[in-house]
Structure formats: C-alpha cells, structure tokens
Image (cartoon, grey):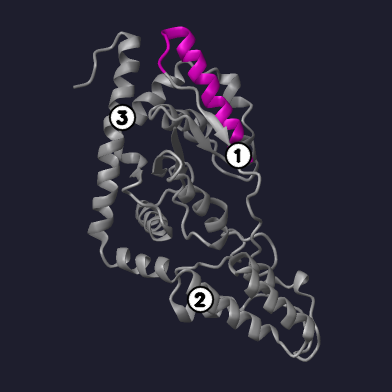
C-alpha cells in the first residue's frame, strides 16, 4: 500500500497541528510505503514572499523530522524538487472538465474571503491530482474539507484512463473521524489565524510565557474548580497519562489548587513529553545542511517514481519518453 500526503508550508506548526495532522501522518509511516511532500508549489497561491516561503519550508521540514517522521521509513521531499508534477498537471488539465473545478467549495470559500482569483487558485485541484497520481498512491489521508479535491483526482484519473488506456492508480481517501479538537489558549479551536496557539518548539522562557497566558476564570485559589470548563485542564489531559489526568482532576475538585499551579504542571508536562522532539528540533536548526541532505534523498527517490509514471503517460499520449 502506498500512502501519500502533502504538507502546506504555512508557518509555525502548533499543538493542534501535532494532534490533528503530524501524529497521524507519523503513525502511517509504519503501515505502508509512505510519501510526504512539502507543498511549496501550492503555497504560491497565497504566499508571495520568496524569503518567507523558503523559511516556512525549512520550518515545516524540521518540525516534522523533530516530531518523529523518519526519512529511512518514508519518502520526504519538497514538491518543487520534482519538476514532473508541473508537466503532469498540464496534461491532466487537458482532460479536466471546467465544470468539475467550478463546483469546488474550497475555491469559492477562498474567493469569498478575499483571495485573488488567480488561475493557480482555480486549478489547485489539478495540481493536487498530479501530486497524487504521479506516485501511484493507493491511499490519501485527507480532512473532510479536502475530500472533494480527492474526488476530483479520482474523476480526472478515470477520464484519462478511459481516453488513453489504463495508466493511473485510482486513489482512495482515508478520513480520520477521530481527529481531536485542540483548544487554544483562549478556549477556541487552536489556530494560527487566531494567534491562540502553543508552539511546542519555543525556547523554554517563551513557552512558559504562552502557557501562563491561557485564559481562565476568576475562581479563588482556595475554592474547588470545575476541570471540564478549564482551558488549562482541557489541554493538559490531551498530553497526560490517565493517572496524571486523575490527579489534576482531584486537585481541581478539592480546592486549594490554583490555575497557576495547573499552568506550571502543563508547562512541565510539555517539556517532558516533547523533550526528544525539542532536542531534535534544535539539532536540525543548527545543522541545516543535514536537513537539505535528507530532503535530497527523498527527492531522488520520488523523482525516479515520478519519471516512471510520467513516461508511461507520455507513451500513452504518443510523446517520446524522457531519458
């Protein structure tokens, strides 16, 4: 089974990303032949500053390697290192019906939010289809918001196969119905756009400052507290063991336990839980050449598979194969 997933270089990854995307992706590398790419071509639809894009690509690569993505178990690479995806995207565009793209909810939503209606934004699903089909992916983990794009990939692949012959593997969507809702420091869903996130790779002093800013009510220290309505406890129990969760719950209900105590406990737990990841993060931040080497290894592997698929496509179109 070949699994493929794309990662947008959209800036700082946070605790919500870790539970919602990073952890499930890392677990999948032990369940099949996993391909993970950093979608920097896709990012061009919204990110126009080359320096910021370059930095975001490095940060997301380091974040995933630090979180446990193992280049020895999977193929991890930059999308823009595989030029074949651009060629396949154009070829797929010649068989993709306009109506299929015009019905895309994601495009309509982004336009409604004020994004410029570029051709790239409109044809985003075709590039996504090229990403998937180029590597003969069997399974594609997607959120519900991306399911329509995966269905478009399947439609385009079937149209191409019907017209030119059996070329593409038809991928299946894998939707994780159990994705956690991680609260931010203000109690709303953790999000970069709301600036309510916790970056687990922050230096200790900065991390503690963020934890101490978690919004709580005005219940006095000596009074009992309801753990189920406390933002600190909601985040704590996502990381804690059953015993740790029970102990903090009892502290809340007993009284004499302040929110400051709970925030310090959460801070110490994050340092403990992510000690290895934080050390790995610092290692790659201080050894950028090693990061580039790992991405090159992934790109070299991906390029071989991409070239094989593209040559099969070119042969069915009547084009010469690439050498």
Residue at 65%, 44% (x, y): give it.
Answer: 177
Task: Describe the element under mark 1 as helix, strand or loop.
Answer: loop
For mark 3, give the secondary structure. Answer: helix
From the top left corner, tell me how far across and down residue 248 is, in percent.
68, 78
Whether residue 314 is situated above or below residue 40 in the rendered picture: above
1 vs 2, front mark: 1
Question: If the image is split into quadrants, where does the N terminus sit?
Answer: top left
Query: CB atoms at circles 1 and 2 under 8 Å apart?
Result: no
Discs 3, 1 touching: Cβ within 8 Å: no
Q: Secondary structure at mark 2?
A: helix
* Image: magenta residue range: 144-167
For residue 98, what is the image quadrant?
top right
Real-space Cα separation, disc 3 to disc 1, in angstroms:
25 Å
Question: Answer yes or no: do the residues labelled 2 and 3 have beta carbons within 8 Å?
Answer: no
Q: Point out the tag, 2 or 3, that comes first from the N-terminus.
A: 2
Could you say where residue 13 lies in the image, as x and y percent from the top left? 49, 59
| Front-most of residues 319 and 161 | 161
Q: Which residue is mark 3?
A: 305
Q: Is residue 111 visible?
A: no
Residue 57, percent from left and from top: 38, 52
Residue 88 in the image, given as x and y percentages of width and height = 37, 24
Q: Is residue 186 left or right of residue 8?
A: right
161 magenta-colored: yes
Q: Is residue 103 left or right of residue 90?
A: right
User: Mark 2 — residue?
Assistant: 207
For marks 2 and 3, give the CA distance.
Answer: 42 Å
In this figure, which residue is indicated by the disc labeled 1?
Answer: 175
Vertical order, 286 against 317 (above or below): below
- Left or right of 27 on screen, residue 101: right
Q: Is residue 3 left or right of residue 255?
A: left
């Amino acid at each position: 089974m070949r699994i493929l997933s794309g990662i947008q270089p959209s800036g700082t990854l946070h605790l919500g990303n870790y539970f919602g995307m990073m952890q499930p992706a890392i677990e999948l590398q032990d369940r099949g032949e996993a391909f993970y790419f950093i979608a920097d071509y896709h990012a061009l639809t919204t990110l126009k500053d080359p320096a910021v894009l370059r930095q975001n690509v490095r940060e997301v690569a380091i974040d995933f390697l630090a979180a446990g993505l193992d280049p020895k178990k999977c193929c991890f690479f930059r999308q823009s290192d595989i030029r074949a995806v651009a060629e396949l995207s154009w070829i797929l565009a010649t068989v993709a019906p306009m109506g299929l793209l015009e019905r895309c909810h994601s495009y309509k939503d982004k336009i409604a939010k004020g994004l410029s209606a570029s051709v790239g934004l409109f044809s985003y699903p075709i590039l996504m289809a090229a990403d998937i089909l180029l590597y003969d992916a069997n399974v594609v983990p997607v959120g519900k918001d991306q399911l329509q794009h995966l269905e478009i990939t399947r439609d385009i692949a079937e149209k191409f196969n019907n017209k030119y012959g059996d070329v593409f593997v038809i991928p299946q969507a894998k939707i994780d119905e159990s994705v956690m809702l991680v609260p931010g420091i203000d109690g709303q869903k953790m999000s970069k756009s709301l600036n309510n996130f916790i970056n687990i790779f922050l230096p200790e002093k900065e991390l503690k400052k963020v934890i101490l800013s978690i919004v709580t009510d005005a219940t006095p220290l000596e009074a009992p507290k309801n753990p189920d309505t406390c933002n600190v406890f909601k985040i704590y129990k996502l990381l804690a063991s059953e015993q740790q969760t029970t102990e903090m719950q009892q502290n809340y209900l007993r009284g004499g336990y302040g929110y400051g105590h709970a925030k310090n406990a959460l801070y110490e737990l994050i340092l403990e839980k992510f000690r290895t990841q934080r050390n790995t993060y610092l290692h790659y931040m201080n050894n950028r050449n090693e990061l580039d080497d790992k991405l090159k290894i992934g790109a070299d592997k991906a390029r071989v598979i991409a070239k094989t698929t593209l040559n099969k496509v070119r042969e069915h179109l009547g084009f010469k194969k690439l050498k």
